Image: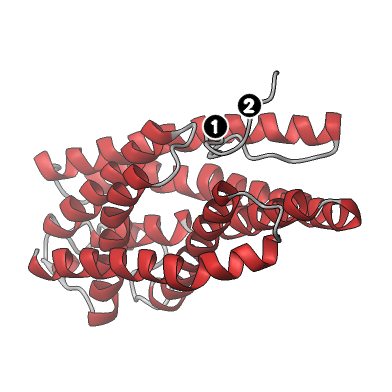
Amino acid sequence: MLVFLLLSAGVFFVNWGLRKAVVEPLAAKLLGAKSTKSKVQKFAQSCMEMVFYGAFTVFGALVVPGQTWFWPSKLWWSDYKSGKMLFVTDALKAYYLLYAARYAQGIVSCLIEHKRKDFWEMQMHHIVTVSLIGISYAFGWNRVGAVVMALLDPADVPLHVAKQFKYVGDARGGKTQKIMQTGADIFFVVFMLLFAVMRLGLYPYVVWSSTFEGPRHFQYGAGAYACVALLFVLLGLQVYWFALILKVAIKVITSGAAEDVRSDDEDEEDEPKKKK
């Protein structure tokens, strides 16, 4: 717990330190003089999200598939009675603790960033994720927990790349805007495909395995049922977000431009509101 708290504080200060000292000044120059403070801050936010999601995607890809129990899924549960499921390698332990720390600082960061349309859903996602990591770590569900963590990160990398393309295009205008919008649309399509495959294709299999395959190997207790319940909550959030993504896809088809309704700010503090 002490290591977790220290890592959470460390990730928080790294996130905001780099954002304020490095990313925002560079974003201001990249977006140009016509850009607003709000756009600069949102660009910096997306940049740091891209870095964190990208880093943990690589970290997970290096650590999780190399575990002896990675596949088939029955190995996630078959060693529970013998106690082998409680064994965690140093690399996996580091991945677990850093992942939990990242989402713990995300709970605080969401409170001081621009409020987004899905603010409460994002806070629920962060809280559920931290709770799931803690409970799964305590009750020996680290194998399925690691698989879930490795599945959920990759899709958000192209999402935040798409956002950065859009912010640059909106700020620069002209021919640059057309080029940047094309890039945003391409990366948004990549994001949508990754989301569909990993979060609505592979992740539900993990939920199924936790619900039906696990009980074949050992009797569930309070910790196990808590993990299953939290996995279903996360699944519900993925379905909700994908419904919003489909709205964006429809908008791309009808208007030719993608705009992420999943996590855009509710309003622009330093820009006049446009009539709908």
Comparing 105 with 245, the one in front is 105
Q: Quadrant of the C terminus?
A: top right
User: How many labels were placed on the picture?
Assistant: 2
Q: Where does the image place residue 51, in percent across and percent down from the top left?
A: 50, 68
Q: Quadrant of residue 19?
A: bottom left
Q: Residue at x 41, y 47 (%)?
A: 113
Depth order, front residue of 106/125: 106
Residue bearing the label numbered 2: 273
Q: Quadrant of residue 187?
A: bottom right
* Residue under numbered circle 1: 267
Q: Residue at x 28, y 49 (%)?
A: 108
- Name the quadrant containing residue 250: top right
Q: Give yes or no for contact between labels 2 and 1 (Cβ–Cβ under 8 Å).
A: yes
Q: Is residue 37 above or below residue 75?
A: above
In the rendered view, does 97 fall on the left or right side of 1? right
Residue 92 visible in the displayed image: yes
Tell me which numbered mark, 2 or 1, is placed earlier along the sequence. 1
Mark linked to residue 115? none
Mark 2 residue type: Lys
Tell me where residue 80 appears, x and y as whole percent. Answer: 16, 60
Q: Is residue 74 above or below residue 211?
A: below
Percent x, y for residue 239?
Answer: 51, 33
Residue drawn 69% across and 39% down?
Answer: 259
Figure check: 120 above or below 161:
above
Most extreme residue toward the top is: 276
Instruction: Please name the amino acid that badge 1 sits on.
Output: Asp
Front label number (2 vs 1): 2
Residue 209 visible to an observer of this rendering: no
Q: Residues within 10 Å of mark 1 (few under 14, many from 20)?
A: some
Local secondary structure at mark 1? loop
Q: Spatial distance from mark 2 to mark 1, Cα to Cα?
A: 7 Å
Q: Quadrant of the N terminus?
A: bottom left
